Image: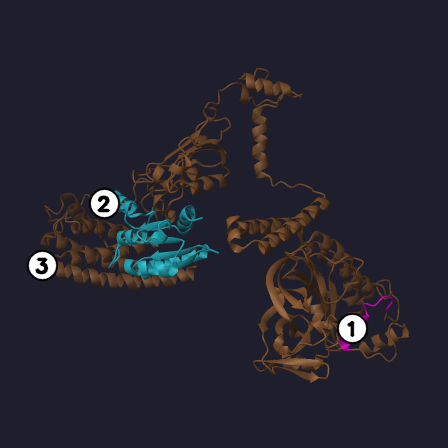
C-alpha cells in the first residue's frame, strides 16, 4: 500500500500542487487547510507522514506539531515542515515542537518525494 | 511531476489566492494607516504576503518571489515588534503593496514588469535602520541596481545548521535566480589515480529517534547506494534491562563505492538529529597518485615488493603472478557498466521453481496450523511476502516475450503467398507478453499449423474474396495476452469460416462420428482437430494431410492448455490457444462439493449468491437458470457434472451459486455446497498419463496436505455435461 500523507497548508493552490506532485509519485495525499483542521484530520486519516506549513490562521504549524506529538498514537509519525521560512530560530522551534525535518519552499517535486521517502520508507 | 494542464489549473487558483491575499493585505495596511497596529492586523498582512511569496516560488515567478520576499522580511520584523509600525513604515509598506499588486499582474501576464527599484530600496532601508530614519520613498538610492539586489532566500546550502535541519535544497534550478545549487565537491576532480571507496561513519545521537526520525533509514539508504556495512559499534549498547527502546546506541561504518558522489551520500543524512555525527571520508590513497606499489598500471611487470607482509602472504599464495591492483579495480568498474548475463541450465531453474512451489505450500500449511496470534509472533505474513517475491523473481527468470515465437510468422506468410497466390496482411498485437520459455518453445509448431490452416482453409482465393465483397488481400490477426494465470494466443482470419456441412460429412466418411450423431456447431468445429481428419479436396504441400490441427491440439493439451475454435460462415475463424503459465500461484476460492474440495480461480469469480426459494428454476428437464437482477443465467450443478451426487440432492437454497465469467458462454452460475476459504494455491499439473479431463486445470496441495483439483472454468462451462444445453440462454444471459 502506498504511503498516506496528510498535507496541511492554508493555500489551496499549494495543497493542490502538493497533491498533484505527490500523487504523481505514488503517494496518497489527504489535505487540511489550517492547523485545527489538520489536527482533526490526523485522527480521521492516520497518515504515515504529516507535511505542514508554518504560517497558517487559527492554529499555526508549530502548534499543530506540538498537538500532534502530544497524541501517543502519533509520537513516531514523521513530520516535515514545508515553509518559505528558513530562519534558524524557526527551525529550532519546529524541532523542539517535534518536527522531523524542514523543507524550504519552493519545493522541487522529486526532491520532496525523495525527502519523504527518507523519513518514511 | 503534475502534467502541465493540471499545473495551469493550479496556477489559476494561485492567482485567485493572490487577489484575495492582496485584498486582505490592503485592508490590513489601510487599518494600520488609520492607526490600528494590533497584532492580528499585522499578522494578517504578513500571512497574505507570505502566501503570495510561497506560491510565486512554486510557479516560478522569480521577480514576484524576490519582491514579496523582501516585503515579507519587513513585515516579519514589524510583526515581531523589532520594527515599530510607525506611520512612515506603514507608508513604505503601502507603496510596496502597490508594487506587489503590479508584480502579481505581471506574473499573470496582464501587465509588464513593474519598476520596483524605489520600493525595494525603501524596504531595504527600513530593514537596515529598523524603521528609524524612514523617508526613503521620496529619494530612492539610485546607486542600488535592482537586478543585483541580493536577496538571500536560502542559507548556504552545503552547511548543516546547528539545529540538525540541513536545508533540503528545494531549488528548481531553472527558476532559481539566486544562484544556489547543490554543492558536491568531488574529490575525483582533485587527483589522478583511482578513487578509493568512501568510508561513512554514522554515529546518531542518543535522541536520534525522537521526533519520528529513524537513523536506520539513513543507513538503509546508504546501502541502497551500494554501501556495505563494514562495522557496527555496539559498545554503547547497555544491558537489556537498561535499554531504552527509543534511544539509539549503535554506530555504523559503511563503505560506499567511489563512483557515488559525496553529496549523494550526505543527502541520506538530511534528517538525522542535531548532534548526530556523520563523517564521510575517503582513503588517502586516492589523493596520492604517487603512492607506490599498488598503483602500478602496467600489467606486464608484476610487482614483487608488496607494501605489507600480509599482502605478500596473500599474493605469494597464488600460483600466477599477482595481478596489479589497478587492473583489477578497472575491471571491476567496467563490470558495473556492462549488463551481465549468465547462462543457466533450465533444469536448475525448474528445480528452483519446484522448490519455491514447495515453500509456498509450506507457508499455507503454517498459516492453517498456527493461530493468528502465533502467525504474527513468528512474522508469518512477512515470510509469505518474501516467498511471493522469490516466486515472482524465479518466474521472471524463465519469462520471455512471445515475440520470439511470433517472429517466424511473417516469413511463413510470404512463402505461403508464393505457393497459394493468396496475399495476406498480418496484424500482430501483444508480442511483448511475457511467457514461460518452455511454453514459447512448444507453441512454435502449433502456431505454424494454425497459420497454415488459416491461409489454406480460411482465406479464400483473391477472386472469391472480391466476389464476396471483401478486399483481395486476406487479414490474419495474431495476438497474445495474459489473463490471470493463462495466456491466450489467438490466430484469426477473415476468411470463409468453417464449412460445417462438409466437416460433418467428412467426419462421417472418415468414421470419426456416427452418421446419426447430433452435434452442436461448436462440436462440429472441434472435429477439425480430431486425429486423421482432413477436408482439403487436394492435398497441398502446406496442409491438408490431416495432421495439422491434430498436432495443435495435442501439443497444447500437453502444455496443460486447450484450443478453442470459433467460426462464423463467411466472416472468419478464430483459433485460440489457452495456455497456462507453468508454475503459477493462483488466487483461488476453495469450494466443497459432496465433501470434496475444489479450487475455483478467483479471477473468474464475479459474485456469490445464496439463492432465495424460487430464484433457481428449471428451464428444460435437464437445465436450470437463476434469476439475478432481471437477467437469467444458466446454472450448473458441479456435483452432477463430476458425478459426485449425494444420495439426497441438495436444494438450491441449501447451496451457494458462484457467478463466474467465462470466455465462451459469458456468465454462468456454478452451484456448490459451501465455500471453505480463499487462498493462494500452487498449480501442479496433472500427470501426463492422466487423460486430459476437460474442466480440470490442474491440482494443488492444500495447507493440511490434502489434494484439491483446480477447476478450469472456461472448459467446464463449455463442456458437454449432463446440464449443458445452455445455448438458448445465451441471449438472456447477455
Helix, strand or loop under label 2? loop
In terms of image quadrants, where is residue B158? top left
Q: Chain of mark 1?
A: B
Relative to B67, does residue B309 appear above or below in the rendering?
Answer: above
What's the CA distance linking mark 1 and mark 3? 95 Å
Number of numbered discs:
3
Q: Classify mark 3: helix, strand or loop.
A: loop
Bin the neighbour count of mark 2 within 10 Å (Cα to Cα): few under 14, some 14-19, many 20 and up.
Answer: few
Vertical order, B698 against B724 (above or below): above
Task: Say whether marks 1 and 2 touch (CB < 8 Å).
Answer: no
Residue B525's label in the rendered image is 1
Q: Which residues are magenta?
A: B520-533
Task: Please say if B301 is above or below B484.
Answer: above
Q: Name chain B's colour.
A: brown
Q: Which mark is residue B35?
A: 3
Question: In front: mark 1 or mark 2?
Answer: 1
* Marks 3,2: beta carbons within 8 A: no
Q: Position of residue B555 (x, y in %)?
A: 78, 59
Chain A's shade in the image? cyan
Q: Can residue B110 be seen in this snapshot?
A: no
Q: Is residue B708 left or right of residue A107?
A: right
Q: Earlier in the sequence, mark 1 or mark 3?
A: 3
Judging from the image, mark 3 belongs to the subunit labelled B
State which mark lies toward you, 3 or 2. Answer: 3
Q: What residue would you read off at disc 2? A: B145
Residue sitting nearer the eye, B104 or B514? B514
Is residue B530 located in the magenta-colored stretch of the structure? Answer: yes
Earlier sequence position, callout 1 versus callout 2: 2
Q: Residue furthest front?
A: B647
Amino acid at each position: 500500500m502506498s504511503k498516506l500523507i496528510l498535507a496541511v497548508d492554508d493555500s489551496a493552490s499549494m495543497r493542490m500542487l502538493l497533491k498533484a506532485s505527490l500523487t504523481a509519485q505514488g503517494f496518497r495525499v489527504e489535505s487540511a487547510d489550517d492547523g485545527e483542521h489538520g489536527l482533526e484530520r490526523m485522527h480521521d486519516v492516520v497518515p504515515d507522514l504529516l507535511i505542514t506549513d508554518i504560517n497558517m490562521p487559527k492554529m499555526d504549524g508549530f502548534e499543530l506539531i506540538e498537538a500532534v506529538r502530544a497524541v501517543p498514537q502519533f509520537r513516531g509519525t514523521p513530520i516535515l515542515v514545508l515553509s518559505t521560512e528558513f530562519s534558524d530560530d524557526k527551525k529550532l522551534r519546529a524541532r523542539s515542537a517535534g518536527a522531523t525535518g524542514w523543507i524550504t519552499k519552493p519545493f522541487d517535486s522529486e526532491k520532496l518525494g525523495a525527502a519523504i521517502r527518507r523519513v518514511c520508507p | 511531476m503534475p502534467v502541465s494542464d493540471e499545473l495551469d489549473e493550479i496556477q489559476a487558483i494561485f492567482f485567485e489566492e493572490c487577489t484575495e491575499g492582496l485584498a486582505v493585505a490592503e485592508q490590513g495596511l489601510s487599518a494600520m494607516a488609520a492607526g490600528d497596529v494590533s497584532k492580528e492586523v499585522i499578522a494578517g498582512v504578513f500571512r497574505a504576503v507570505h502566501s503570495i511569496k510561497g506560491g510565486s516560488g512554486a510557479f516560478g515567478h522569480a521577480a514576484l518571489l524576490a519582491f514579496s520576499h523582501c516585503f515579507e522580511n519587513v513585515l516579519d520584523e514589524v510583526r515581531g515588534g523589532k520594527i515599530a509600525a510607525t506611520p512612515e513604515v506603514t507608508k513604505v509598506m503601502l507603496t510596496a503593496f502597490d508594487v506587489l499588486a503590479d508584480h502579481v499582474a505581471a506574473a499573470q501576464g496582464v501587465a509588464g514588469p513593474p519598476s520596483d527599484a524605489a520600493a525595494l530600496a525603501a524596504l531595504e532601508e527600513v530593514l537596515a535602520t529598523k524603521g528609524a530614519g524612514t523617508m526613503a520613498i521620496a529619494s530612492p538610492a539610485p546607486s542600488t541596481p535592482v537586478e543585483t539586489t541580493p536577496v538571500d532566500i536560502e542559507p548556504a546550502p552545503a552547511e548543516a545548521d546547528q539545529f540538525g535541519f540541513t536545508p533540503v535544497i528545494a531549488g528548481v534550478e531553472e527558476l532559481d535566480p539566486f544562484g544556489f545549487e547543490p554543492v558536491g565537491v568531488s574529490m575525483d576532480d582533485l587527483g589522478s589515480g583511482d578513487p578509493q571507496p568512501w568510508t561513512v561513519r554514522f554515529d546518531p545521537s542518543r535522541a536520534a529517534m525522537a521526533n519520528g526520525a529513524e537513523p536506520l533509514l539513513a543507513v538503509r539508504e546508504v546501502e541502497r547506494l551500494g554501501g556495505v556495512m563494514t562495522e557496527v559499534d555496539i559498545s554503547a549498547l547497555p544491558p537489556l534491562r537498561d535499554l531504552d527502546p527509543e534511544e539509539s546506541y549503535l554506530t555504523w561504518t559503511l563503505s560506499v563505492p567511489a563512483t557515488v558522489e559525496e553529496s549523494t551520500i550526505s543527502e541520506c543524512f538530511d534528517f538525522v538529529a542535531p548532534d548526530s555525527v556523520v563523517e564521510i571520508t575517503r582513503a588517502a590513497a586516492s589523493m596520492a597518485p604517487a603512492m607506490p606499489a599498488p598503483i602500478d598500471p602496467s600489467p606486464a611487470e608484476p610487482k614483487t615488493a608488496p607494501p605489507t607482509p600480509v599482502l605478500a602472504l596473500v599474493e605469494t599464495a597464488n600460483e600466477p603472478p599477482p595481478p596489479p591492483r589497478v587492473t583489477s579495480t578497472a575491471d571491476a568498474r567496467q563490470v558495473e557498466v556492462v549488463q551481465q548475463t549468465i547462462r543457466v541450465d533450465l533444469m536448475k531453474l525448474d528445480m528452483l521453481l519446484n522448490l519455491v512451489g514447495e515453500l509456498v505450500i509450506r507457508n499455507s500449511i503454517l498459516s492453517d496450523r498456527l493461530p493468528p496470534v502465533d502467525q504474527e509472533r513468528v512474522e508469518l505474513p512477512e515470510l509469505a511476502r518474501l516467498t511471493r517475491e522469490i516466486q515472482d523473481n524465479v518466474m521472471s527468470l524463465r519469462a520471455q516475450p512471445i515475440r520470439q515465437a511470433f517472429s517466424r510468422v511473417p516469413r511463413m506468410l510470404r512463402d505461403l503467398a508464393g505457393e497459394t497466390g493468396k496475399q495476406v496482411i498480418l496484424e500482430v498485437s501483444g508480442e511483448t507478453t511475457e511467457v514461460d520459455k518452455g511454453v514459447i518453445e512448444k507453441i512454435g509448431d502449433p502456431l505454424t499449423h494454425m497459420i497454415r490452416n488459416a491461409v489454406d482453409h480460411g482465406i479464400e482465393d483473391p477472386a472469391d474474396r472480391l466476389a464476396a465483397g471483401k478486399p483481395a488481400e486476406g487479414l490474419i490477426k495474431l495476438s497474445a495476452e495474459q489473463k490471470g494465470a493463462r495466456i491466450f494466443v489467438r490466430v484469426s482470419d477473415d476468411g470463409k469460416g468453417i464449412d460445417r456441412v462438409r466437416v460433418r460429412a467428412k467426419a462421417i466418411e472418415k468414421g470419426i462420428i456416427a452418421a446419426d450423431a447430433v452435434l452442436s456447431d461448436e462440436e462440429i468445429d472441434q472435429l477439425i482437430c480430431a486425429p486423421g481428419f482432413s477436408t482439403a479436396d487436394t492435398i497441398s504441400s502446406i496442409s491438408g494431410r490431416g495432421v495439422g490441427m491434430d498436432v495443435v491440439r495435442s501439443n497444447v493439451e500437453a502444455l496443460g492448455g486447450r484450443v478453442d475454435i470459433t467460426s462464423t460462415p463467411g466472416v472468419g475463424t478464430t483459433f485460440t490457444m489457452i495456455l497456462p503459465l507453468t508454475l503459477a500461484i493462483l488466487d483461488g476460492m476453495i469450494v466443497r462439493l459432496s465433501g470434496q474440495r475444489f479450487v475455483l480461480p478467483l479471477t473468474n469469480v464475479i459474485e456469490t449468491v445464496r439463492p432465495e426459494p424460487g430464484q433457481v428454476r428449471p428451464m428444460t428437464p435437464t437445465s436450470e437458470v437463476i434469476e439475478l437482477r432481471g437477467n437469467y443465467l444458466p446454472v450448473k450443478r458441479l456435483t452432477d457434472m463430476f458425478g459426485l451426487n449425494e444420495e439426497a440432492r441438495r436444494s438450491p437454497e441449501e447451496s451457494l451459486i458462484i457467478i463466474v465469467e467465462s470466455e465462451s458462454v459469458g456468465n454462468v452460475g456454478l452451484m456448490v455446497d459451501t465455500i471453505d476459504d480463499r487462498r493462494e494455491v500452487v498449480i501442479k499439473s496433472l500427470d501426463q498419463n492422466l487423460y486430459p479431463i476437460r474442466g480440470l486445470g490442474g491440482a494443488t496441495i492444500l495447507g493440511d496436505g490434502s489434494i484439491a483439483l483446480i477447476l478450469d472454468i472456461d472448459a467446464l462451462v463449455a463442456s458437454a455435461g449432463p446440464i449443458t444445453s445452455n445455448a438458448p440462454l445465451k441471449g438472456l444471459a447477455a
